[in-house]
Each structure stands twice: as C-alpha cells, then as structure tokens.
Image (tube, grey):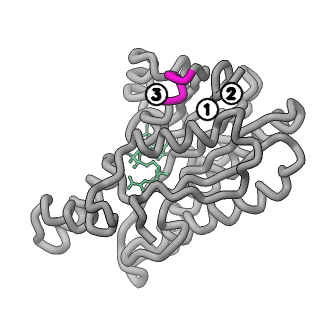
Amino acid sequence: MTGVKGLNALVTGGGRGIGAAIAAALSRAGAHVTVLGRSEASLAARVAAGDASAYFIADISDRAAFAGVMRRIVADRGIDILVNNAGAALSASFLKTDMAQFQFMLDINLMGPVIAAQEVLPGMIDRGFGRIVNIASTASLKGYSYVSAYVAAKHALLGVTRSMALETARTGVTVNAVCPGFTDTDLVSASIETIVARTGRTAEQARAELAKSNPMGRLVSPVEVADAVCWLAGRETGAVTGTALPVAGGEQ
Ligand SMILES: NC(=O)c1ccc[n+]([C@@H]2O[C@H](COP(=O)([O-])OP(=O)(O)OC[C@H]3O[C@@H](n4cnc5c(N)ncnc54)[C@H](OP(=O)(O)O)[C@@H]3O)[C@@H](O)[C@H]2O)c1
C-alpha cells in the first residue's frame, strides 16, 4: 500500500482550524483518523462530516489526564501517524508575560506533544513504522514581537523534534515539524482582535499587517498545511526525518 491508506492516525486539535483540515486530508487519503480536543461539539462534527472515524476528549495542558487518554487511545488502536497539532498562542510584551503564562505556553505547545509522542513511540518502534508530525511554526525558526512565550515553546518543540529524529533514525519512525506562517484560522482571528483592541486599527488593517509578513501577501490556508502533513505522514517519506518544513509563502 502507498501513502497513508489503511494507517491509523491521531490528530490533536482536530476539531477545527489546521487540525480539522489535516484530519480531512488524511481521511480522504484513506487513513483511519481519530481526532482529539476539548470541544465535543466540534470533534463530533468532524466525525459526522466523515473527516474522522472517532474522537477523544482531552485537555492537553493537563499532563496526567492527557497521558491517561493517550494510553487509552494506544490500547484501543495502534497509532501509526501522530499529528501534534493542538496549540495556542498568547500575545503580550515580554515584560508583561508572567511566569504562569510562560508555563501555560510550554504546557500546551511543548509538553502536550512530548506526552503524546512518549505514549505512541514504543508501539511505533515495535512495529518498525511510525510518523510523528509536529505542527510547529515559523515562530520555531525566528522571533516575533509580543509572543515571546509562544516563540520559546515553538522553538523548543522544533528542538525536541530534531533530537527525537536522531534517536529514532534506525527504527522506521520519522519525526518532522511543519512550520506554517500566519494561517487563516481562529488563532489568527484572535490575534487580529488583540491588535484591534490594542492599536485602534481596523480588523482589515490588522489582517493586512499579518498577511504582509508572507512574501505572497496573503495568509496561508489550512489546506496547504494539511497537504504538507499528508506528504510527511506517508509511507514513501521514510528518508525524511528531523526536518522543519515551512509552509509560509517564502517568509524567512
Ligand atoms: N494559525 C496560524 O497562523 C498558525 C501558524 C503557525 C502555527 N500554528 C499552529 O498550528 C496549530 C493549530 O493552530 P490553529 O491555527 O488551527 O488554531 P485554532 O484554530 O485556534 O485551533 C486550535 C486547536 O487546538 C485545540 N486545542 C487548543 N488548546 C487545547 C488544549 N488545551 N487541549 C486540547 N486541544 C486544544 C483546539 O481544540 P478545542 O478547542 O476543541 O480544544 C483546536 O482544535 C497550533 O499548534 C498552532 O500553534 C498556527
């Protein structure tokens, strides 16, 4: 078999935004997709739409509870493809970002993916095949103002991706990061609302400001990120590991 056909995939944060597009793309390509998140309504909607075959509810920032749910998923079905997509961004100046906010960004954007990977990896190694795709960010590759805690957590996620890739290089498991630029989802809508509230700009001006960082002058679409994930998740990309693949219109 080729591509992702017949493989079991888990997409965290698969209920909406980039995760929903990834779940849909993997399902269309023939994978059996499980989605996970906090909002039952959006997860159930993905199953109803045929973009996933099952869902689990978990808050990935609650380490013990999330690890417990991951153990249930792994016991229920071997996971061949883990897409660590669930994430969140807080914006504030560095001096106004308190320790709890730094910890929150690390819990969601770093420890969540680490917990999920630690639960799925032993089974992947036993079966001699696995694909872990971490949804990192261009914020894993460069700094941005007013999101230092998010940038720190996303840099750390790329670091752990690279180390895991080296440790698993002879096992049939690959570990990669996809690094989207500003992508048209709720996360960017929230950033636009923050810019409007803090600067008095209109939503259109704020959106144009974000789009300007992409040399193509537009936001990335979730489907474009999903296509990159599908490629990395497929059987044919066994030699691709430890990479950070930007989907960002050429943003450096
Ligand atoms: N949009 C961008 O511009 C952009 C750019 C680069 C990277 N990214 C990354 O791409 C990923 C997806 O972002 P998005 O833009 O699609 O964001 P989004 O539209 O805000 O969706 C976030 C997803 O993560 C889930 N999630 C958030 N906190 C969670 C928690 N504590 N426990 C479990 N699930 C949680 C949400 O599900 P529930 O609400 O059901 O919990 C939702 O499905 C994130 O890792 C983000 O950092 C986004």
Which residue type carries mark 3?
A: Ala
Q: Is residue 94 magenta?
A: no
Horizontal side of residue 116 vs 27, given as left or right: right
- Identify the magenta region: 25-29
**Dot 2 crowding, Cα within 10 Å, few <14, some 14–19, many 20+:** some
Q: In the displayed structure, would residue 155 be above or below residue 232?
A: below
Residue 140 image point, x, y percent? 54, 66
Q: Nearer the viewer, residue 194 or 231?
A: 231
Q: Nearer the viewer, residue 43 or 226?
A: 226
Closer to the N terminus: mark 3 or mark 1?
A: 1
**Dot 1 crowding, Cα within 10 Å, few <14, some 14–19, many 20+:** many
Residue on which disc 3 sits: 24
Residue 95 image point, x, y percent? 41, 84
Q: In the displayed structure, would residue 74 be above or below residue 111?
A: above
Residue 192 image point, x, y percent? 23, 60
Query: From where the camera sits, is residue 38 visible?
Result: no
Residue on which disc 1 sits: 10
The tag on residue 73 is: 2
Horizontal side of residue 164 vs 194, given as left or right: right
Closer to the N terminus: mark 2 or mark 1?
A: 1
Query: From where the camera sits, is residue 191 visible?
Result: yes
The residues tagged by marks 2 and 1 sit, at their Cα atoms, a distance apart of 9 Å
Which residue type carries mark 1?
A: Leu
Image quarter hosting the C terminus: bottom left
The residue positioned 51% from the left and 46% from the top of the image is 86
Which of the 4 image quadrants contains residue 198?
bottom left
Which of the 4 image quadrants contains residue 117?
top right
The residue positioned 54% from the left and 17% from the top of the image is 53
Are the two marked residues, 3 and 1, in contact with CB atoms closer than 8 angstroms?
no
**Dot 3 crowding, Cα within 10 Å, few <14, some 14–19, many 20+:** many
Which residue type carries mark 2?
A: Ile
